[in-house]
Amino acid sequence: MIWTVNGSAHTSGQVRAAYRYCEAVTGHEARNFAYGIRLLPTEKRQAMSAVYAFSRRVDDIGDGELPAEEKLTRLEGARALLDRVAAGEVAEDDTDPVAVALAHSCSIFPIPLGGLGELIDGVQMDVRGEEYETWDDLALYCRCVAGAIGRVSLGVFGTLDGHDHERAAEYADTLGLALQLTNILRDVREDAGNGRTYLPAQDLAKFGCADGFHGDTPPAGSDFAGLVEFEVRRARSLFATGYRLLPMLDRRSGACVSAMAGIYRRLLERIAAEPEAVLRGRVSLPGREKAYVAVRGLAGLDARRTARGAVRAPRGDA
């Protein structure tokens, strides 16, 4: 595979077309993610689009209508693609634009492809219908489907000189857990309709919600608001730790992370303010509010505020 000319990055027409495809997928499917990566310089934005397009493919397999065994087979096919990328076996004229874009991105940035393998592991857990008894059990799943993506993204962002990359990866992983737990709270009704409950069984039992969620009102006799408050406090603690990543990144990478995390943090606070809203439908932020968060991220406002808060924040339930 030849990706460089005279030691500098070379982008052929095929590679540019592959990136355009990945950016189109990202722009159409990503929603919250897209607001953040728009703030990145071209090469990093393209690389993050390639990472997203691969992740979207894996998620779509898991969420699709195929039989479980076929899903598992296709997920192994996605793992084989990662192996080809890692082995340098993807040429720029390959017919799979996601493979081309991801391989080219790996020639520029030290992307830890093992994290995308962990994403596949997590989606396989979904396909097999695994359940989570405790927070530690759920955290393992969250690390696969979200924390790992944080660590993969850090390979694109890099860290500023003088900062410990391994510590930064821990913060990126924790921030991924915060985002995923927020997703789980937002989608509790939708997931229940699909026969899935991600919140720990131990927590559900504690607040009288062990029978699950089957309507637009809390289970009879439950303390649903208490359950949401409990999980929100856990997510806030995860955000506080994860935000320690921001001062370790360059300005535009930090703005990207701040924008994405800021959108989810605001979503979390909206859920905290009206817990039962998640049973009536998907809670979301209007586009103008997402754009506002992105602008604050680029200006560094949320990064400075949340970094100061992270230093003071207790670890709480996490």
Image: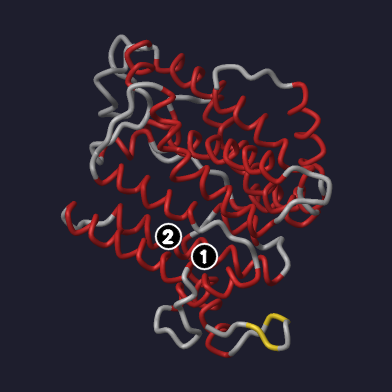
Element at label 2: helix
Please give the label number shown on residue 43: none
Measured along the vertical axis of the image, is residue 155 above or below residue 300? below
Name the side, left or right, on which 13 lies relative to 163.
Answer: left
Q: Are marks 2 and 1 in contact (CB under 8 Å)?
A: yes
Q: Disc 2 or disc 1, which is closer to the eye?
A: 2
Q: Residue at x 35, y 65 (%)?
A: 80
Comes first in the chain, label 2 or label 1: 1
Amino acid at circle 2? Arg
Q: Quadrant of residue 144?
A: top left
How far across and how far down the image is residue 110, in percent? Answer: 63, 61
Residue 307 falls left or right of residue 128 = right
Number of callouts: 2
Amino acid type of the residue tagged 1 in the rendering: Thr
Up/down of 223 relative to 118, above or below: above
**Picture quadrant of residue 318:** top right
SS category of the residue bearing label 1? helix
Residue 255 coordinates in the image, percent (x, y): 74, 52
Residue 115 vs residue 292, the one in the foreground: 115
> Coloured how?
secondary structure
Identify the residue under disc 2.
Answer: 56
The residue positioned 40% from the left and 30% from the top of the image is: 138
Left or right relative to 138: residue 22: right
Up/down of 313 relative to 58, above or below: above
- Classed neighbour count for the residue bearing mark 1: other residues with Cα under 10 Å, few (<14), some (14–19), many (≥20): many
Query: Which residue is found at the position 58% from the left and 83% from the top?
Result: 16
Residue 117 location (% of width, % of height) = 42, 54
Q: CA distance from mark 2 to mark 1?
A: 8 Å
**Residue 304, x across and y down, in percent:** 82, 38
Marker disc for residue 26: 1
**Dividing the picture into quarters, in which one does residue 220 lie?**
top left
Mark 2 crowd level (few <14, some 14–19, many ≥20, 10 Å Cα): some
